[in-house]
Amino acid sequence: MTETSSPTVYGYPRQGPDRELKKAIEGHWAGRVTERDLLDVAAGLRAGNWRHLTEAGVREVPTGDFSLYDHVLDTTVMVGAVPPRHRAVVAAEGPLAGYFAMARGTQDVAPLEMTKWFDTNYHYLVPELGPDTVFAADPAKQVGELREAVALGHTARPVLVGPVTYLLLAKPAPGADPAFEPIGLLDRLLPVYAEVLAALRAAGAEWVQFDEPALAQDRDRAVLDAAAHAYRELGALTDRPKVLVAGYFDRLGDALPVLARAPIEGLGLDFTGPAAANLEDLARAGGLPGKRLIAGVVDGRNVWINDLGGSLATLATLLGLAGRVDVAPSCSLLHVPIDLGLEHGLDPRVGRWLAFARQKVAEVVTLATGLSEGTGAIAGRLAANRDDLASREASALTHDPEVRARAAAVVPADTRRPQPYGERAAAQRARLGLPDLPTTTIGSFPQTGQLRAARADLRAGRIDQDAYDELIASEIRSVLVFQERAGIDVLVHGEPERNDMVQYFAERLNGYLATQHGWVQSYGTRYVRPPILAGDVSRPGPMTLRWTTYAQSQTGRPVKGMLTGPVTMLAWSFVRDDQPQAETARQVALALRDEVADLEASGIAVIQVDEPALRETLPLRAADRPAYLAWATEAFRLATSGVRADTQIHTHMCYAEFGEILAAIDDLDADVISLEAARSHMRVADELAGAGYPREVGPGVYDIHSPRVPDAEEVAALLRKGLGGIPAGRLWVNPDCGLKTRGWGEVRVSLDNMVAAARVVRAEAG
């Protein structure tokens, strides 16, 4: 090895230990926090992150990874690709208002579409590009944050979304030919990236990192040639910092030799999970002689401790393949909570198996020390790590023989409803008596400050369980009364008792653990606390029965039972990595099957099992997808196939590209599926119709991730478009997603408009 190995990271959680960023941004939206105060909070959080990283032993901190909403949106601003409708907001109200208009929309301006960031639960804002797009460099944010870090005495490496990934993530702008491919704009975009590189060089950057995770997906020769062209052009620049390209989330495959041969100075590779294949691929490509390799050997997406001995063995092999090997997590630490040290309620037997962002930084520093100074320098930490790993493997907390025996006894008949869909549909129509274009909502209603305060009061002992339960019952009654007055056909109880659609169930299932401060960004200011799935899963007792049956007792209209599906229960948790996910999903499915049976036995005629993560968890490589989809759809059917023909099973998915999984959606065999469609203008309805999807569909007509209130004609226009492919007898009318994050004022008007639109279009359809 020609140089000492250094620890580094690609990115760090943005929110602050007490979600200070969320509070400041939402305060700004509400008019309580000035723009200056918001920017000061953000600067303080960045400084705190850099200070922690430096004090932990990281010698080169990332800049540019911090964002007020989304790093892809930041890139859109950096390259001057702000859509015309948002430029008007910038001109009238300033850059920050325009930035948030792109993210959330305004009453008069629609936001950018939002979808999942590869196979994670993070969401990004989709760039809108067309043949007429003109790019212009605006690196003020990237240069400003670099200067902040340098002024504080840090060595910093700006991290940017690479040009190829940026274009591959984009979609055709409104009015552009739907067949337009934004990657064709590469030659127009590269001079802008060259300007950004020059500006960063002038501000003191020695290295700049371009993230190209899109190259970890299957790509054709045209895209690989585009990547080669991009980095040949950028590499040939004279006024630039050293360039490092990072790919993660999976193996780079055919893109690896392309990047290895490019005239750049470094490459960052993921060596965890399926991306471990990068090791052999790198050797086959001839390594990176004379270049820098950042080796992502610590899993940046899950919370289990690293096998330090195994990682050191991988790093030792890599030493012979590159001029310099540095150590990092596999990707940005954006995807894990900040600090395990904040979790005082976790069973210490489990805590020793876990590593959050701060602990992962410590692991990276330990590995870099061991690589540079030899294992003797970290002998104590290696011994403790071996003990922790052995403790987990031998623990009774992770193994339940009864659960395993039940899962092993599942037979194919358990995973299929005995009646064909046509027979079920007739039985459900007779039982439910719904009109064409029936209206419903997805599940949750606004979680008011009163509800959140009551939940906190109950935890703190300031109110007793009876007082809390009465508040929940009162909220359910109010939600039901509103829905009845609005004219909604299939009701929900509003989920006032639930903190989160995964956490709520995790707290009621054996095998899961909940955190107190394990917040992770999902999008913008939406943070979730993914539970930790540590052991075998079973249901001690009913989880939703009490409040669902209470709600049904208060109304003559059907009330949906609301459950979270097995795939989502895995995907939105930190799932155990010591057994195949298919086995874990089957355990969760059996627990949910028991809950479905209890709901049906109590008279609930409509049961919704949400699977928003089905598409999100789709492997990035096509060769890995059939096996995943087989166990994922089987798990859903195992949870839902024990019901009678006249019990209607719904599912829900949101904010993903569904075209690639239409066959799997069909294989779920749900009677009704509701999907996000408002921002994408009913595209999924066209896709389902084109695929001949035979069952009922509710493409969303109300974008709940924006404060915009759609008027009745806007909703009616979407419904008419939906009717172009789906007949009125199979088309449902519903919002895109649950209403938990919205306010009551906008929800009331939006749902009234939705019902009014359904009545108009129903009459038109005759």
Image (cartoon, rainbow, N blue to C red):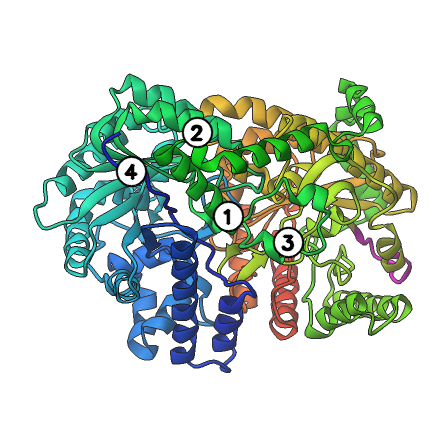
Q: Position of residue 692 (x, y in %)?
A: 56, 31
Q: SS class of the residue under badge 1? A: helix
Q: Position of residue 34 (x, y in %)?
A: 43, 81
Q: Image quadrant for the N terminus?
A: top left
Judge the density around disc 3: few (<14), some (14-19), many (≥20) Cα neighbours within 10 Å.
Answer: many
Can see residue 118? yes
Mark 1 vs 3, N-terminal side: 1
Residue type marked 2: Leu
Q: Which quadrant of the view contains residue 463?
A: bottom right
Pointer 3 residue: 733
Can see residue 249? no
Q: Could you tell whether 657 is left or right of 579 in the image?
A: left
The foreground one among 674 and 397 is 397
Q: Residue at x 78, y 27 (%)?
A: 417
Q: Which residues are magenta?
A: 552-560
Q: Position of residue 256 (x, y in %)?
A: 30, 27
Pointer 2 residue: 312
Residue type marked 4: Thr
Q: SS class of the residue under badge 2? A: helix
Residues at marks 1 and 3, CA–CA distance in whole angstroms: 34 Å
Q: SS class of the residue under badge 4? A: loop
Pointer 4 residue: 4
